[in-house]
Image (tube, rainbow, N blue to C red):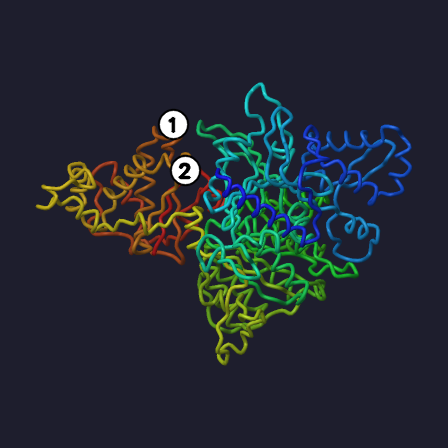
Amino acid sequence: MTLDSAHKEKAFENDIVQGFVDQKWLSSPNDKGYDPYKALYVPDVLAWLKSAYAEQYAKFSKRSDADEFLLNVIEEALKEKGTLYVLRNSLTAIGFGTFRMSEIKPEDNRNPIVAKRYKANILRVVQQVHFRTDSKESIDLVFFVNGIPVATAEVKTNFTQDVNEAVIEYKKNRKPKPTKTSAECPLLKPERGAVVHFAISETDIQMTTKLDGEGTRFLPFNKGNNGHAGNPEATKTNPYPVSYSWKEIGKKDAWLGLFHNFAYVERTVVTNAKGYSVEKSTLIFPRYHQWRAVTKVIADAKKRGVGQKYLIEHSAGSGKTKTITWTASQLSKLRDENGNAYFDTILIMSDRKVLDSQLSKAVLQFNTKEGLVKSITAKDGSKTESLVKALVDGKRIVIVTIQTFPFAMEEIILNEKLQGKRFAVIFDEAHNSQTGRSSARLNTALGNVGTGSQEAQTVDDLLEAWQKSRLRPANVSFLGFTATPKHQTMMLFGRLKNGDAYDIAKADSNRELPVSFDKYPMRQAIEEGFILDVLQGFTPYSTAWKLSQKTETDKDSESRVDVKAAMSGLAKWKALHPTNVTQKTKFIIEHFKRNVASLLNGQAKAMIVTSSRASVVRYKKAFEQYIANHKDEDNIPILRLGIPLAAFSGEVVGKDAKHPADVVQDDSTAWVNLIKADEKYTEQSLNPSVSFGQDGALEKPLTVTTIAS
């Protein structure tokens, strides 16, 4: 690094520090006061205890070793329980009593002691922190809450470098334990030390919660730029594209909220490459759009109260399940200044079975009270009785499926015991079919009786019927989470651009169309690497056929494909009728195994988009037949094909999926006899063995999904 570039980097580092100071942070130009053995900024730890627990500290300080004793108690708690636990929960020191190491802003004014402790919080950013006891290396910035490190940052300038240089520095030089014989660095140890590590340049921010050498995975922490990745251009008021990191995230309430209401440790059981079940511990920290969406919803609910609508339009790859988890958890804790809950129950409509477990475990870390989350399942006997009891008892968070949701809305609107109670209803994306009986119940509850017979419906049909009813209970706020909102979704959950409610009863006279409350677009998700642009790898059948034809030009030029192999593999396609999918199925699976299976650490998936729902039925049966005929491949983890799923709306009559040429020629075509002309096929009937919901199925090793376009 040249002298000039080092000067620019230091200037940018100083500007970051000044940005946090403007948010009423304290700052230190060096690490005097930092103990690298304990990973504590000792002066702030003691200052917090003296201020927040003045009487206890005054009595305890008569001991000659009082300060060292308290520091050791905190250090041991960090080793045993981790940083998040120490920040959120009470600790006990013999002779001193119980105490907490930070205090989140109270929701109401009922407890002046808690309010006083909140004001006593000390936020500090320290420059050039020497984090190892066996070297003179230093990290550019470390952020502390009451002397406990919660974040680090390596700063690079775009003058000669970029954010990738900071990422590389973390991977190569910021290992918790560089060698087997070196001392372990508590500041960098996952869960024990800083919760999150930021790589920062003037235009880009990347983050990670686990430093693991070359295996460290960084995620973007950027706002997005007009639908794309990155950040908005600099302005006079925001001199750097990353100014939001201190102007928004650096605000006292926002910063403390990140570690009290967002970050948590997720422990899950996963299947490794050898097929064994192992427990995986992951420290979860929100991406910027997740934090933004949740905080916007909470702020708006405080401002406008109950009876609002929110459309959270977040692309696939956005982490919607976690965003829903954070939203539900924080809505359940929302109180007015007198301590009254804004919502008596948060009702989540979702078919993601993983949501129940994840939500319960996450909420328990934010609130230690057991039983806050209730999932309505057949295990409890009658779903209706279980649902009514949960709502009447005021369970804080209740999860229902699409089949149960109409019953829930009927109870909310018509049950006298629930009159006066307030609810937030969260709609998660779902595609399972909906029975006419359930839909009729919802229409009855919404005053939409007599609209004709109720056919089997999807969620979209259900929402459309609800939209037409134009009745919105004043005691319910509705939140819709989706990647691809349709017209009725926008009408139901959208708002005007100024944030005001969209009056669906006057929709015909409204000139302005509703918009999403918060948006994380697909283009940004693609550019940030969370999802693939499927159009980049889309190959129509006609194109694949053409690849097999050798032209005069090909004879004299280097071909981009192995023409001989292409002709051998694709010539069979040319002679086959398009509706006979056996050879196509073999081609797709063989291509997947050769070229795709090893990607994404062996967790790659495949999606087959067909031209019709009838084709979905045929492909589903063909894939099942192929897998049944190749069971030996399941012994090889990376080739394990998992469970093929079918996804489409409505139903397909068997005769529409049959073809005159359906004749069993050998074992590979035996699937044609599995299609019965008089049978009706739906998502549920085609996926009978899937008891864990489609989300769970997609966690299986290599799942193939067929979808009707």
Q: Residue furthest top?
A: 181
Instruction: Give residue 651's quadrant in the image.
Output: bottom left
- Looking at this view, is 256 or 458 the one in front? 256
Q: Is residue 169 left or right of residue 603?
A: right
Residue 145 in picture, x, y percent from top left: 70, 43
Numbered disc 2: secondary structure? helix
356 displayed left or right of 491 = right
Residue 319 % position (x, y): 52, 49
The answer for how far apart the CA atoms under marks 1 and 2 are is 20 Å
Q: Quadrant of the C terminus?
A: bottom left
Above or below, 609 against 60 in this view is below
- Residue 43 spot, x, y in % from top left: 77, 38
330 shown above or below 131: below
> Farthest residue toward the front?
3
User: Marks 1 and 2: CB-CB under 8 Å?
Assistant: no
- The x, y position of residue 147, in whole percent, is 72, 39
| Dot 2 amino acid type | Leu
Foreground residue among 163 and 484:
163
Asked which quadrant contains residue 333, the reply is bottom right
Looking at the rendered structure, the kind of residue marked 1 is Asn
Camera-nearest residue between 626 and 367: 367
What residue is disc 1 on?
Answer: 635
In this figure, what is the number of numbered marks? 2
The kind of secondary structure element at disc 1 is: helix
Q: Is residue 111 above or below residue 489?
A: above
- If you read the primary sequence from the N terminus, does the residue marked by circle 1 or circle 2 appear first? 2
Asked if 162 appears above or below 518 in the picture, the reply is above
Q: Which residue is mark 2?
A: 600
Residue 386 visible, this angle: no
Residue at 70% over, 61% down: 342
Evaluate whether residue 650 shows in this view.
Answer: yes
Horizontal side of 549 relative to 631 (left or right) equals left
